[in-house]
Amino acid sequence: MASSANSRLEILTRHLTSAAFASKAGSDGENLEWIKISPEVSEALKTGSPIVALESTIISHGMPYPQNFETAKELEVIVRKNGAVPATIAILDGVPCIGLTTEELEILARLGSKARKTASRDIAVVMAGRENGATTVSATMYLASVVGIPIFVTGGIGGVHRHGENTLDISSDLTELGITPVAVISAGVKSILDIPRTLEYLETQRVTVAAYQTDEFPAFFTQTSGCKAPARVESPEHCARVIDANIRLERKSGILIAVPIPREHSASGHLIESAIQQALQEAREKKISGNAETPFLLARVNELTGGASLASNIALVKNNASVGAKIAVSLTQLQKHSGKRL
Ligand SMILES: O=c1[nH]cc([C@@H]2O[C@H](COP(=O)(O)O)[C@@H](O)[C@H]2O)c(=O)[nH]1
């Protein structure tokens, strides 16, 4: 335990030193702290308590206001109820923030797509421009790993887009998973994407992929995708053992744990599927591509299903938050014995 806490302290000390350096380096003499960790998250890092990182693109671009604000708050409540500290991550006025206040969550929720969708490649630009950035899976993973948070909950990750073999439109979520040792708990990959190629690409990136209590890789709104998952995990403890092994191995790559949407919320799956097909067709006709494609498809599918997809989306993220927090608690217990942390 002492050595675990020490290793977290080492990480923090490194970052505080970097922040001080950044401050000194600021040519205009301003205090340019480059990262802000909330007091609660900072305390949890020091004491080695379980923490769950949460992303912010899901708030700004993934859902409309006010459901996005309500969901963001509820996710934090669920994480707490299950014994972990939530750390929603975003960039506010150019400062990466680990752990947001309710007021900050509301700012992001109201900004919606006016906040910049920030993938890992965009972090430096958003910081330099002192912009507000909603972090995607890739950017959230990166920032979580920088401060030593090994578990991150989201709804769905990006992937290989359909026709990606021609367009090379592959989300940087997949490459970040290849180089950043954070476990991402998601409901799999939406069928707006090419699921078989996404799984192939994850293999190429050396990402450990496991489905939770099922043999099949889930497709976000539906429990099944027709693709077999490379591995199966049975419980939060089992997930924690996989994450712990990855940390001990120092593989420096991520883990994707795919949790199927709860059965009672997957009923509208087929309705949603046909809306997805229509939205995809419209995106092609309107020539919408790149990082605008996912937000367009999500919003259009929600319109076409009369809000059913949003209700399912909220339900599955909440379920992921509960599973993710339990995994974080198990991992902390395991690491009390092994002493090895991210
Ligand atoms: O079902 C969803 N998939 C993906 C996203 C967001 O979109 C990002 C991927 O975007 P792109 O495909 O442009 O890489 C993810 O990291 C996540 O933040 C989302 O909100 N909902």
Image (cartoon, helix red, strand yellow):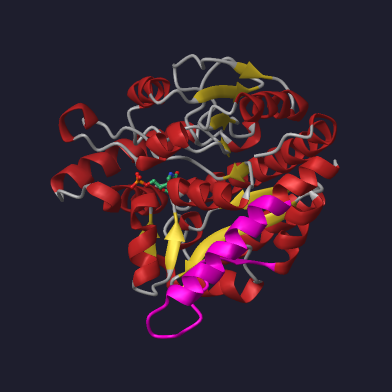
Instruction: Say which residue appears at 44% left-offset and 32% top-offset.
Output: 178
Indicate whether 25 appears above or below 177.
below
In this view of the protein, which residue sits in the foreground, 64 or 49? 49
- Does residue 308 appear in this view? no
Looking at the image, residue 146 lies above or below residue 221: below
Q: x%, y% of residue 32?
A: 48, 76
Q: Nearer the viewer, residue 296 or 201?
A: 201
- Tell me which residue sits at (37%, 35%) in the image: 159
- Residues drawn in magenta: 9-38
Quadrant of the image containing the N terminus? top right
Q: Quadrant of residue 41?
A: bottom right
Q: Residue 87 at what x, y percent from top left?
A: 65, 57
Q: Is residue 319 visible?
A: yes
Query: In front: 3, or 97?
Result: 3
Q: Is residue 278 left or right of residue 201?
A: left
User: Is 241 included in the stretch rendered in magenta?
Assistant: no
Q: Nearer the viewer, residue 222 or 172?
A: 172
Considering every residue shown, the one lying at the far bottom of the view is 29
The residue positioned 43% from the left and 74% from the top of the image is 25
Image quadrant where one finds the C terminus: top right
Residue 12 lies in magenta, yes or no? Answer: yes
- In which image quadrant can residue 134 be found? bottom left
Percent x, y of residue 227: 44, 16
Q: Quadrant of residue 235 in the image?
A: top right
Left or right, 282 with reference to 227: left
In this picture, residue 238 sits left or right of residue 184 = right
Residue at image coords 33%, 64%: 125
Above or below 321: residue 116: below
- Image location of residue 338, percent across then percent down: 79, 29
